Amino acid sequence: MKISVIVPVYNTQDYLRECVDSILNQSLGDIELILVDDGSTDFSTDIIYEYVERYPEKVRAISLDNGGQGRARNFGIDIAKGEFLSFIDSDDYLEKDALLHLYEAAVRENADVAVCDMEKRYDDGTREYVKAALQDDPLASAGSASNKIFRRSAVGDIRFPVGLWYEDFSFSAKMLLKSKATVFVKEALYIYRCGQSSTMNNNNARKNLDIIEIMRDIRDFAHAGGYKDGYEFLLINHVLLDAIKRLQLQSSADKKEVIHKLRSYVKESIPKLSECESFKKESGNRRMIMRLNYYGMEALAIKILKIKSKLG
């Protein structure tokens, strides 16, 4: 079997059929679909077992009490039979050739990870093309697990963290650090439905501190595997740049305290930013924003970014 598609499901009855149909109608036929019901309280459970009954040779189901997306995905990994693993969110869906193009690219390049671009689709019909990575380094694509397929033999005992934010980032970062080869398919094959609530759009500033625990775990993984430079790349891009920027844009009363703690963690790991090899390789604009965030001038960094956005 070429790909096991793992879909954690929690109360997405309005979108689940479109998601499942997009997987079952893939042009790559040699797949299995594992639907993990994470304690749904709406009609999602009924929909899941309707598909199991209709497609017993292709669809399997696991029923759990509610424990979060990461835990649900881990249960799916443990029973998956495919050569590659795919993780799709139950309110999103795939273009018809998504898995075929990702699988062919991975096989052609003997890659452990294949990554595609995404398209955001809003309730008003607006569409937005989203590149998987804005930089050449594959680690720049670590944010999501859903627009990727992962070679099962390379996954080994890597699993999603349970009960923490940034679970996708944790799994993807480890796999990209470990990957002997990563290939990019520059097509928007994964359709991300916008308008629903999401972790990254949540105004709960304090939960962003979970990234410190995530980064410590990635640090240990990276150091054990000899990926120190990779860890520093992830730290400055996903904590010093992205997380602090996202928090500065929030209205939460806790954001200043959380930003201070994130900055302190970065400084603890990188006492001299100018000597960090990953920092030296960044573009001038990115270095400027990182430097401002490093020295506590994130408000100025946001103003500069807004001015640059207006100027195009």
Image (cartoon, rainbow, N blue to C red):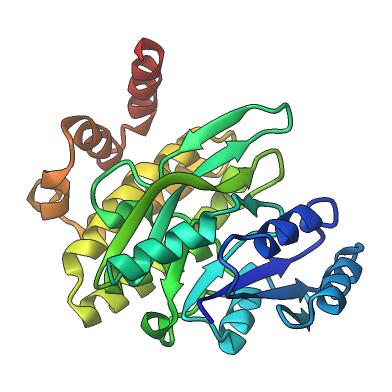
Q: Image quadrant for the C terminus?
A: top left
Residue 120, how many percent across, how many down? Answer: 58, 38
**Residue 4 screen position, x and y as percent:** 57, 76
Question: Can residue 66 be seen from the camera position used here?
Answer: yes
Is 87 located above or below residue 301 in the figure?
below
User: Which residue corresponds to the image point at 62% horizontal and 80% vertical from the top-left?
Assistant: 76
* Residue 288 found in image quarter: top left
- Where, by quadrant of the figure, is residue 125 drawn? top right
Q: Nearer the viewer, residue 302 or 41?
A: 41
| Point 28% across, 69% down: residue | 177
Q: Closer to the camera, 121 or 32?
A: 32
Visible residue check, residue 265: no
Residue at the image point whose x is 71% and y is 44% from the top: 196
Q: Position of residue 78 (x, y in %)?
A: 57, 88
Numbered-mark total: 0
For residue 127, above or below residue 36: above
Q: Residue at x 66, y 68 (%)?
A: 7
Furthest residue in direction left, as rendered: 275
**Percent coordinates x, y for residue 133 in the rendering:** 35, 46
Quarter of the figure that contains the N terminus: bottom right
Q: Judge whether 46 appears above or below 141 on screen.
A: below
Res. 307 image quadrant: top left
Looking at the image, residue 28 sits to the left or right of residue 139; the answer is: right
